[in-house]
């Protein structure tokens, strides 16, 4: 008992997940037997012309593409066993900071499997896709209501695609005003995609530092701003989990210098229904629907990264845009569009899931999401006091960043070791070594869908890991965390070897080459 | 209504008490009063049952969903068996994040390793990445790689490349500073002869091209050689079941749209950008790459590797900003290719080609309808009729067919403008094609 009032069992700890032995899983290529098959195709009644009759000789492949040949039963066994070697939100808490790994409601997945949505070809004329277009238009309207913006494009397939789209909008805005501006300001605590997106948007990066409170250093910002600056990219709350409380003043400074404000929506979750980026003064906002709006992340994608803009930028948006028309829904092409940024209309089945999530929550529900995400993060943060360092000891928003710097100095146990030991407690690890401005950083985002019991169990585990490290150091014993994890399908990897002796395909294995 | 927040009022009160706060509002003390939101203007929350009813009503308005599909243009109506849906729908794959902790992400990592192997084999190249957003995004990344390797921002892009991808290429060129020059088609295939001498970063050709025609990859390779450029080939992964691999023909980078490998049409996404390259380019490879290694006990294991290329480490010097990709679609593709196997992929491609010939002959037998070009096609073809393609598509939809894609953007002023691009997959039967041809004859009369 820890004095925090939590006594019930946690619903989000995966330590009870069964493992049937510790043998590795062969690749599907090793399971292959020539001539074995799973496929069957529709009877077509078509003439059975041969390949040679259909394809000119110079184009015809001499040998078929070598693919695995397995029975359906073995295909199912293989990928099911692989799935058992994979942590997931459905299994337990996933407190990866800045990733907002909340529970993904099942009905949203079921929506995406409805044939009347799933089976629609993207080139279907508008009148054959009225349901789809209505969903997309309503989603755009909801995202604008949530962000306080005028219009949005749904085309960007992920956050980084949204960032680059936003930067191209920024560029087009300045070009339309006959201005050439070469630099975009980002804080040193920015997400890694921000500087890369700035470069691909054709801009140079200007960095501003963090002040002792963990917020944007306004003095440094003032020194950087000028006629050469196209705008600033900010997350709010920032990557330290702190609300930029001077955002209104920052917006004024940037606008006075002729720049635009770009809102990186990675951290929008705690702001839902509380404060809108448009009201903070932002001109361009991207959203990560796979974070804030609970669409499943699929092991690293798909995502969706819609970009919403203020009234002055609407005509620059990528086209074609789904829109309301006189007789229903159709597509419109913005007058000064920067152009298309996706093969079709964006990751539609992801967009549909987000539309469902918003419909299920409503405005009040979204506010409840925000508040409880902040409550969980602050509660967890407070529970870690004493066990870890607080580089910025302030109330946080949806996530907290603590440091294992003292722990490392005292015991030799680093943030990485804490993360690996936490896996043995049945939780996914937090984000480690980010943001870069914090030494031995552990960035922890419990999200609102973890119950108080689960958050308590997570806190207990993190505190126990620190206590264990200190006890072992005091006794002069080996540190269990340094060898963790031991209970996982594989243990720590030789990552240097993976890079040095690259084997990125089965055919590059040393025993298959030459 | 459908709340996914577990906290009871008592839970919230206890947690606030622990924090020494008296209300949830106090959590937001840092947010200035003046900018706080008074409430979101959103419709009332729905219960799950009400949501499902609403979805059914909206779905009923997607009348195109029931149409027999003859549209392609990068999105194809292929067979997706139950086993692929079941495995790709496993929640361990669906609800996991990027594999940052490889000890508990071997499932996704190994599936991606298998995917990379299959994609590299399709392309006939050594390396494939773990996926990009879609075919268009893969093409943009390929030109970025080519420009940074060769030092030339000039991209010669065949008019036969999917015009929507070319549009995307132009959009991103505003940021990268690339110059995109479109090389026109002559008699359906790219005419490389008119290129100005000099240097270029990339030569891009599609195989088959947007109008379904088989391009001469040797001619494209020669054009690239003359310019010191990389050859980028946009490959159709299903057509690859019958066609020579672009790698064999000398491609440096092969990109493609992977939707056809087990992913639904889904009104355009999420799809899957395929990306393969020669091993020498691996350090400029965009996106994630999974490599094989061992753990501390010597067991085989998988991990994302050559991470120093990626945006979060290389920051503004990164060659790509890609972070989230399309992992689940890549896993789906690996399962689909595992289901098809060596013989199945070839059979799918062969059946597409048979259906395409049958359909082309049936439509071209209709008075007034004729192929735009006589050049050999594989699974798609462009057809001219006395009516504009858009009108034909509209009328065919009323007959229960998605008749194809009107050819317009990218082909203005050419013989293909106003034509109809028709695709036939292995799912189309002779009876469906006969019915389609009869409807076609009616609507152009």
Image (tube, coloured by chain):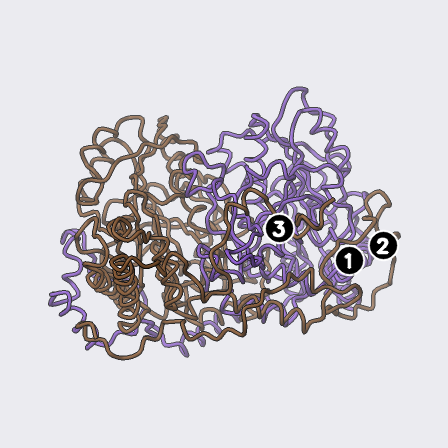
Chain colours: A brown, B purple
x, y (%) of residue A419? Answer: 36, 58
* Residue hosting label 3: B257
* Residue hosting label 2: A51
Co-location on one chain, circles 3 and 2: no
x, y (%) of residue B368? Answer: 79, 51
* Rendered residue at 25%/29% (across/down): A224
Residue under mark 3: which chain is it in? Answer: B
The residue furthest top is B198
Toward which corner of the image does residue B193 lie, by quadrant?
Answer: top right
In the image, B359: left or right of A369? right
Using the numbered discs, state the Cα–Cα distance from disc 3 to disc 2 in whole angstroms: 23 Å
* Rendered residue at 45%/69% (across/down): A108
Which quarter of the rendering shows the N terminus of chain B? bottom left
Picture layout, residue A114 above or below residue A209: below
Using the numbered discs, state the Cα–Cα distance from disc 1 to disc 3 in whole angstroms: 18 Å
Residue under mark 2: which chain is it in? Answer: A
Report crowding for label 2: few under 14, some 14 to 19, many 20 or more residues within 10 A (C-alpha): many
Q: Which mark is residue B346?
A: 1
* Rendered residue at 30%/43% (across/down): A234
Residues tagged 1 and 3 counted as in contact (Cβ below 8 A): no
């Amino acid at each position: 008992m820890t004095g925090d009032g939590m006594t019930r069992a946690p619903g989000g700890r995966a330590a009870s997940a069964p493992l049937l032995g510790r043998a590795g899983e062969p690749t599907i290529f090793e399971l292959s037997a020539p001539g074995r098959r799973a496929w069957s195709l529709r009877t077509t009644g078509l003439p059975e012309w041969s390949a040679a009759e259909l394809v000119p000789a110079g184009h015809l492949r001499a040998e078929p593409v070598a693919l695995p040949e397995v029975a359906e039963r073995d295909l199912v066994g293989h990928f099911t066993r692989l799935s058992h070697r994979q942590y997931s939100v459905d299994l337990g808490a996933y407190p990866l900071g800045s990733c907002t790994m909340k529970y993904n409601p099942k009905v949203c997945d079921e929506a995406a499997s409805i044939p009347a949505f799933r089976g629609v070809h993207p080139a279907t004329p508008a009148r054959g896709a009225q349901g789809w277009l209505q969903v997309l238009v309503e989603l755009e309207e909801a995202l604008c209501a949530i962000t306080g913006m005028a219009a949005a494009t749904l085309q960007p397939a992920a956050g980084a695609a949204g960032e680059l789209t936003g930067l191209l909008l920024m560029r087009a805005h300045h070009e339309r005003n006959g201005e050439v501006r070469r630099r975009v300001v980002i804080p040193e605590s920015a997400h890694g995609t921000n500087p890369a997106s700035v470069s691909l948007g054709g801009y140079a990066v200007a960095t501003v530092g963090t002040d002792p409170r963990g917020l944007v250093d306004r003095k440094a910002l003032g020194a950087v701003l000028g006629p050469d600056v196209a705008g600033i990219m900010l997350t709010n709350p920032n990557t330290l989990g702190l609300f930029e409380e001077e955002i209104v003043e920052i917006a004024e400074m940037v606008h006075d210098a002729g720049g635009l404000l770009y809102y990186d929506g990675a951290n929008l979750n705690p702001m839902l229904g509380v404060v809108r980026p448009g009201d903070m003064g932002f001109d361009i906002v991207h959203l990560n629907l796979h974070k804030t709006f609970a669409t499943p992340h699929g092991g690293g994608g798909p995502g969706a990264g819609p970009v919403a803009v203020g009234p002055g930028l609407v005509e620059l948006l990528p086209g074609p845009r789904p829109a309301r028309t006189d007789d229903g829904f159709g597509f419109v092409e913005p007058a000064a569009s920067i152009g298309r940024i996706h093969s079709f209309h964006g990751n539609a089945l992801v967009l549909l899931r987000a539309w469902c999530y918003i419909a299920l929550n409503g405005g009040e529900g979204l506010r409840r999401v925000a508040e409880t995400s902040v409550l969980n993060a602050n509660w967890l943060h407070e529970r870690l006091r004493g066990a870890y360092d607080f580089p910025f000891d302030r109330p946080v928003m949806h996530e907290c960043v603590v440091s294992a710097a003292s722990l490392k100095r005292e015991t030799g146990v680093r943030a990485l070791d804490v993360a690996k030991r936490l896996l043995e407690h049945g939780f996914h690890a937090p984000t480690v070594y980010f943001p870069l401005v914090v030494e031995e950083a552990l960035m922890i985002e419990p999200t609102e869908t973890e119950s108080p019991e689960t958050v308590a169990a997570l806190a207990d585990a993190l505190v126990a890991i620190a206590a264990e490290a200190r006890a072992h150091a005091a006794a002069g014993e080996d540190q269990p965390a340094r060898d963790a994890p031991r209970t996982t399908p594989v243990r720590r990897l030789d990552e240097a070897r993976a890079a040095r002796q690259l084997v990125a395909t089965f055919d590059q294995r040393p025993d298959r080459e030459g | 209504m459908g709340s996914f927040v577990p906290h009871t009022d008592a839970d919230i009160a206890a947690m606030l008490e622990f924090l020494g706060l008296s209300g949830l509002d106090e959590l937001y003390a840092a947010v200035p009063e003046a900018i706080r939101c008074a409430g979101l203007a959103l419709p009332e929350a729905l219960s799950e049952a009400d949501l499902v009813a609403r979805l059914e009503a909206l779905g009923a308005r997607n009348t195109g969903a029931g149409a027999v599909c003859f549209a392609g243009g990068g999105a194809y109506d292929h067979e997706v068996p139950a086993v692929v849906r079941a495995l790709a729908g496993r929640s361990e794959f669906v609800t996991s994040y990027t594999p940052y902790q490889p000890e508990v992400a071997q499932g996704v990592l190994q599936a991606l390793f298998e995917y990379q192997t299959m994609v590299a084999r399709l392309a006939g190249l050594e390396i494939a990445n773990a996926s990009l957003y879609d075919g268009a995004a893969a093409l943009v990344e390929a030109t970025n790689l080519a420009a940074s390797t060769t030092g030339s921002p000039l991209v010669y892009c065949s008019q036969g490349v999917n015009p929507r991808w070319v549009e995307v290429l132009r959009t991103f060129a505003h940021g990268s500073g690339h110059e995109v020059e479109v090389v026109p088609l002559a008699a359906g295939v790219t005419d490389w002869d008119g290129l100005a001498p000099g240097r270029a970063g990339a030569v891009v050709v599609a195989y088959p091209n947007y109008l379904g025609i088989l391009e001469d990859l040797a001619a494209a390779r020669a054009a690239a050689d003359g310019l010191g450029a990389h050859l980028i080939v946009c490959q159709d992964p299903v057509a690859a079941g019958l066609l020579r691999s672009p790698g064999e023909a000398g491609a440096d980078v092969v990109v493609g749209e992977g939707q056809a490998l087990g992913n639904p049409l889904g009104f355009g996404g999420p799809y899957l950008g395929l990306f393969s390259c020669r091993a020498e380019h691996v350090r400029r490879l965009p996106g994630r790459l999974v490599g094989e290694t061992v753990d501390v006990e010597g067991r085989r294991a998988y991990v994302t590797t050559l991470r120093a290329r990626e945006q979060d480490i290389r920051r503004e010097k990164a060659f790509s900003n890609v972070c989230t990709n399309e992992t689940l679609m890549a896993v789906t593709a690996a399962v689909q290719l595992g289901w098809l196997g060596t013989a199945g992929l070839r059979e799918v491609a062969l059946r597409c080609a048979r259906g395409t010939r049958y359909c082309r002959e049936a439509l071209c037998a209709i008075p007034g309808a004729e192929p735009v070009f006589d050049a050999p096609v594989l699974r798609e073809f462009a057809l001219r009729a006395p009516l504009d393609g858009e009108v034909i598509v509209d009328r065919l939809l009323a007959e229960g067919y998605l008749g194809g894609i009107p050819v317009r953007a990218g082909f203005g002023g050419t013989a293909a403008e106003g034509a109809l691009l028709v695709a036939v997959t292995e799912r189309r039967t002779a009876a469906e094609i006969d019915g389609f041809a009869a409807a076609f004859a009616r609507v152009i009369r």
